[in-house]
Image (cartoon, coloured by chain):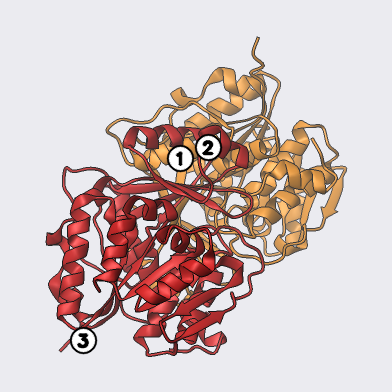
Chain colours: A orange, B red
Amino acid sequence: MTDRSVDALCIGNAIVDILAHAEDDFLVREGLVKGSMRLIDEAEAERLYGAMGPAVEMSGGCAGNTAAGVASLGARAAFIGKVGADSLGRTFRHDITAAGVRFTTGEIEGGPATARSMILVTPDGERTMNTYLGACQELTPDDIDEDVVAAAAITYLEGYLWDPPKAKQAFRKAATIAHGAGRRVALTLSDSFCVDRFRDEFIALIGDGTIDIVFANEAEIKALYQTADFDTALAAAREDCKLAAVTMGAEGSLALTRTESHHVPAAPVERIVDLTGAGDLYAAGFLTGLSRGYALADCAHLGSVCASEIIGHIGARAEARLADLAAQSGLAG
Amino acid sequence: MTDRSVDALCIGNAIVDILAHAEDDFLVREGLVKGSMRLIDEAEAERLYGAMGPAVEMSGGCAGNTAAGVASLGARAAFIGKVGADSLGRTFRHDITAAGVRFTTGEIEGGPATARSMILVTPDGERTMNTYLGACQELTPDDIDEDVVAAAAITYLEGYLWDPPKAKQAFRKAATIAHGAGRRVALTLSDSFCVDRFRDEFIALIGDGTIDIVFANEAEIKALYQTADFDTALAAAREDCKLAAVTMGAEGSLALTRTESHHVPAAPVERIVDLTGAGDLYAAGFLTGLSRGYALADCAHLGSVCASEIIGHIGARAEARLADLAAQSGLAG
């Protein structure tokens, strides 16, 4: 019998990234907020593409990046997300499958085009995302494969799923199936603007036990608890969340429960080229650590190692084999 | 009046690169010769894509890479090449235009798809190319814009153009117009296998004065003169070519005429990631130097600076502004 068990199932928007270098002036002229993600329609996507510089195209999407990272660590990953029947959709499917991730969601025929995110990378390595969701909007509860969810130790959901209404229903269905099978559910808050849009709902999901594990960065956790004070936000997170993993860029990360608090430094990086995917790859390491029963500090350490790989080059999919980097850091599988 | 003059017009195959890391074992299993370029049909392109790893897509093509490099140096570049009316064609057009290159060749409606080259990058940084020419085959003499050719100080042609029969006619037409306008014509030999296919014709083009400047690497110049001895090949090149620029990887390059010979060392590189585009960017620097009236040794030096940028990252289009790197090396425009 084939072992169909999965260490991490990642559900999210299936997006191809179109990455270009941009000067800060360009962001100012376009009225863009550095480091943020904004949703745009197809017309604006075309206009911005025409205005931006030469680009590189590679598969992305938060949950997709995380799934590819989990697979690169040698763990078993699956992905659920919606692409269109077009060239970018084929690219997305090829890349995630070739990365070793199980991906069986069908594409939409005759619907909107595959999602793309135009990512402007400024000289400081920050990324500013402009996302046309397209086919992602069509993810529905029917796309949630019950067998895969039940077989996954952890189901990881991205906060961005809360934008398309049907995807939100799919999100809830997945959480229900996972808990019914005695599994855990994780949520990444995705972006502080995303938190602003859905704060009450996210708080409710955490409060009612729909979410077992929360991933956030400093801006997101402050946005969630509507405070400018990081310590206040952390105290609230420890109170509310069964487990929270909070990233702090160069300051490392925190793994928090009611009874435990671990600060783990960031892994060293020669040169920051592009921060795209740093949080996604941190989650990949952390989730893989959890699925292997690591202590929380080791989960955070593995997250840091993965994040350090991704920020040293353009794009949010690992170039090195993460399992090798993990082994070099004494975190073999 | 608008100044329509062009420093370098590059004519070649309009190709989108699909770059993936691959182990040496993969090349062996696929029966591929490391470092070479082979032509494949669409069915083989699909099959290989399915077998290879996660990929990055970015515009490429030798002459396109060179044109983008010339523009990045702050000189005036134009490109002629054929794309299809499809997603990859739009990507190619966007990238080369956004790089500042004049590109006005129309796309083919209802014809073959835009060319793509699946480039397998091994851990040593070598690249092995598998190219489906598609729409490139449709470049015809009608696509050669007489005004642009006549306005270009140098018209640069890639040896690969000799593969599609109509492109070969376009190549000859461009050379005739250029010489009629008192301009110079350059040829890159492209690849030693390409030289093997068309040796006699290339020798004739050089001998009858169709070509003023020859770009080649060590393997290509040896293939041209059918000798295993580099010095023999160089002696023959000095005899035949008005000007030859011969690259030797880490050993630097040579600029040769009957009366001059300059050996210029390679510019230092921290780490070789991907050799794709090294020769193309060397040509960009050399051509820009020629258009500015630099001494030959300085042309070669500028070529080396450009090549050193491109091999430090994945892909054949510069990430840094080459004009800045040139200025840092004392070769300001």
Determine which residue is flagged by label 2: A96
Image coordinates of residue B85 in percent, x first then y, are: 22, 49
Residue B84 visible in this rendered orientation of the protein: no
Circles 1 and 3 in contact, beta carbons < 8 Å? no
Q: Is residue B288 left or right of residue A4?
A: left
Q: CA distance from mark 1 to mark 3?
A: 43 Å
Identify the secondary structure beneath mark 1: helix
Q: Is residue B102 visible?
A: yes
Q: Which mark is residue A92?
A: 1
Kind of residue at disc 3: Asp
Q: Residues within 10 Å of mark 2 (few under 14, many from 20)?
A: many
Label 2: which secondary element: helix
Instruction: Residue under label 3, please give it.
Output: B3
Q: Which quadrant holds residue A53?
A: bottom left
Q: Residue at x 27, y 33 (%)?
A: A110
Q: Amino acid type of disc 2? A: Ile
Q: Quadrant of the C terminus of chain A?
A: top right
Kindly identify the amino acid type of the residue bearing the numbered disc 1: Phe
